[in-house]
Amino acid sequence: MNLMLLFVASAITLASCKSDDNNGLPNPFDTVTEEVGNEREKIVVISDLHIGNDLSYSENLKHIKRLEQFLNEVRSSETVKELVIGGDMLDEWYIPSRTDTYGGSTQADFVRKTVTANKGVFNVIKGIIKDGKIKVTYIPGNHDMGFTPANVDIAMPGVNQARDAGEKYPVGTYHPDGYSQIAIEHGHRYDFFCSITKGANETEAPGAIFAPGYFFARIAANSFTDPTTKEASTKVPVTTLNDPGNPEQFSKFVYYQTWKKVIEDVIFIKDNFNDPIIVTKVGNFTKTYAIKDILPQNSTIDGSIQIKLYNDIFTQANWNARQVYNNVPVMTNINEAIPGSLDHNFLDGQANRQYFQNPNSSVRIVVFGHSHEPLIASYTNPKGEKCIYVNSGTWEDQKTRDKNAAIDQDNLKMDFVVITPAKTNKQKLLVGLYNYHGGKHVAVDSDEVEL
């Protein structure tokens, strides 16, 4: 057990700066130890809240009251300086495929409905912003990449939005006040299935930027709202690689294998793949698609692998251009990136590749969300300096296809990160990963780095 875990473990026996409104108990953010003082300097990071528009299929229903409780602790704390929401807060991707996302209305109305359905959470966030004591920053994720800054402001008036400059509004990196060596982002810009995909479907949807993962999310929602079993599910038709020496064909086959794994091992579907079941009407998509439209298949003309949607994105040159558009500094290989979308090790490893091993970067602490796999990892950069990567996990419920399954949701997920300067050495940052299980701060892992 290192110093961070030691001070967390002993915190309950030590004095508190201030009591909150939770039955007069000490605010768990404000415990004082030998390592941590009582100044307002903590940075709290949460991500992947997946707050839904419709509570009949929202990914965050069982945890929503705990989230409200957690945010009230942040609000009443006298030592929290910043609250960073690292993406996938709002969700216009996880919508059952037959559902018209906006219901014939607008994105702004969709946001208003989301706020109304989860008013307790948004009331607390609005209160934190209005109080003016704690800076609240929102970073776009992939599930909320389509929301305009103005519509995010409807949900959280006055929130600081960390977005890359120019037209690349669906992605951003945030450096907390006074800490240029900390980088917080969602992490989807490195994901083949989830990064901004501009110009990929100009015939079908001119101006669309939604990535292939959008269609995965729509189908995945069906898998849980209208469940079937793996044995009874529709199987993916066979597609053959007939020209293995063609790099584009090879990449399409890798893509096919990835989709096959997802559909047959992760999301089980009862629909006929030829039936038009994916209603879009969002993100410049206007048509209704069948599952076959997103799956690679052999052409009846020449046997080559072709796809109706995203057909032209499978060259290394295209992937490089797409990475440049997403402001990715260090290029990755397309045939590693495609299956890497399912591998949190590939996605989390981009912190090391893009920041710590990048000679043009001075960042020493990186926080991603996106993969939903909370963890802390230590690296060493080329200068021999220690660096820390943290994944902030998720607040979504544990999904189940069995509606009668007994799941202890109160002790699953609900992850958060706290970054704190040491009391006697402000250049030493203590990085803690926690669960909010049973409404308590449960230490998972920690590390420290001196800048």
Image: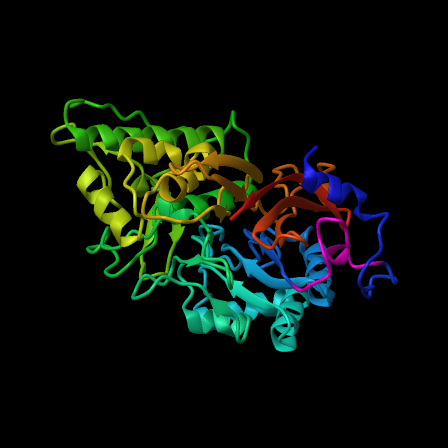
Where residue 76 appears, as percent x and y from the top left, is: 73, 67
Residue 37 is a magenta residue: yes
* Residue at 29% in and 58% down: 208
Residue 382 seen by the camera: yes
Residue 275 seen by the camera: no
- Spot the residue most to the front: 424
* Residue at 38% in and 36% down: 382
Find residue 82 and report its image quarter: bottom right
Q: Is 335 placed left or right of 108 in the picture?
A: left
Where residue 232 appears, as percent x and y from the top left, is: 51, 28
Span highlighted in magenta in the image = 26-40
Question: In terms of secondary structure, what is the magenta stretch mainly?
Answer: loop
Where residue 173 appears, as percent x and y from the top left, is: 42, 56
Find residue 447 and report its image quarter: top right
* Residue at 27% in and 26% down: 239
Give the position of the N terminus as an image quadrant.
top right
Find residue 80 and report its image quarter: bottom right
Towards the viewer: 427 or 342: 427
Q: Is residue 123 above or below residue 1?
A: below
Residue 259 is a magenta residue: no
Towards the viewer: 449 or 79: 449
